[in-house]
């Protein structure tokens, strides 16, 4: 019995002592109260997110998700990511393929001709 107890004691991971925290080797984690972010309205949430972004020098959405995944999830759920990280001016949205546009026009012309032949006149 003593051997088992001694083996269990040796396999346990030591808790961080006050000395380790005092030396700055381990950081003490800050915990937010439950529902802290979800209780905020949109304006408070945006200002909190912008402060966090400035404080941690966050450059993009993925690094925000790594820094605080709960905040990122709530911003995404409320569709506020564009207000926190606006799209750059020079970046255009996906360009449409000219061949696809031409095919759509041809399809519309074909449908119009078909309905004209049937006498519906669209």
Image: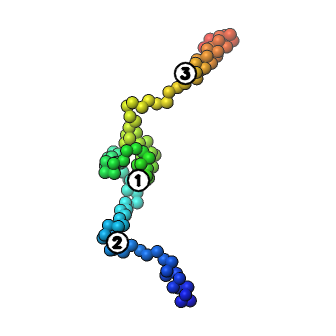
Above or below: residue 72 compared with residue 118 = below
Mark 3 → mark 2, Cα distance in angstroms: 64 Å
Q: Which mark identifies residue 101?
A: none
Q: Nearer the viewer, mark 1 or mark 3?
A: 3
Q: Between residues 13 and 116, which one lies in front from this camera angle?
A: 13
Q: Earlier in the sequence, mark 1 or mark 2?
A: 2
Callout 3: SS:
helix
Residue at the (38%, 37%) spot, across then down: 86
Q: Is residue 105 visible?
A: yes
Check the picture and name the quadrant holding the N terminus: bottom right
User: Looking at the image, do the residues carrying marks 1 and 2 touch, with CB atoms under 8 Å apart?
Assistant: no
Callout 1: SS:
loop
Residue at the (50%, 27%) spot, across then down: 95
Q: Earlier in the sequence, mark 1 or mark 3?
A: 1
Residue at which label 2 appears: 20
Q: Between residues 106 and 75, which one lies in front from this camera angle?
A: 106
Residue at which label 3 appears: 98
Mark 1 → mark 3, Cα distance in angstroms: 41 Å
Above or below: residue 94 compared with residue 35 = above
Q: Residue furthest bottom?
A: 2
Check the picture and name the quadrant holding the C terminus: top right
Q: How is the image coloured?
A: rainbow
In the picture provided, is 82 more to the left or to the right than 104?
left
Residue at which label 1 appears: 68
- Residue 14 x %, y %: 43, 75
Residue at the (35%, 45%) spot, across then down: 46
In the picture provided, is 113 more to the left or to the right than 58?
right
Residue at the (58%, 21%) spot, across then down: 99
Above or below: residue 26 compared with residue 82 = below
Q: Is residue 74 visible?
A: no
Q: Earlier in the sequence, mark 3 or mark 2?
A: 2
Q: Nearer the viewer, mark 3 or mark 2?
A: 2
């Amino acid at each position: 019995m003593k051997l088992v107890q001694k083996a269990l004691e040796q396999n346990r991971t030591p808790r961080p002592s006050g000395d380790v925290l005092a030396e700055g080797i381990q950081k003490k984690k800050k915990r937010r109260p439950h529902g802290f972010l979800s209780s905020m309205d949109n304006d408070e949430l945006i200002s909190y997110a912008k402060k966090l972004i400035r404080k941690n020098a966050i450059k993009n959405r993925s690094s925000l998700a790594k820094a605080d995944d709960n905040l990122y999830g709530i911003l995404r759920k409320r569709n506020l990511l564009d207000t926190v990280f606006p799209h750059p001016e020079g970046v255009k949205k996906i360009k449409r393929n000219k061949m696809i546009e031409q095919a759509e026009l041809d399809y519309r012309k074909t449908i119009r001709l078909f309905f004209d032949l049937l006498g519906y006149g669209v």
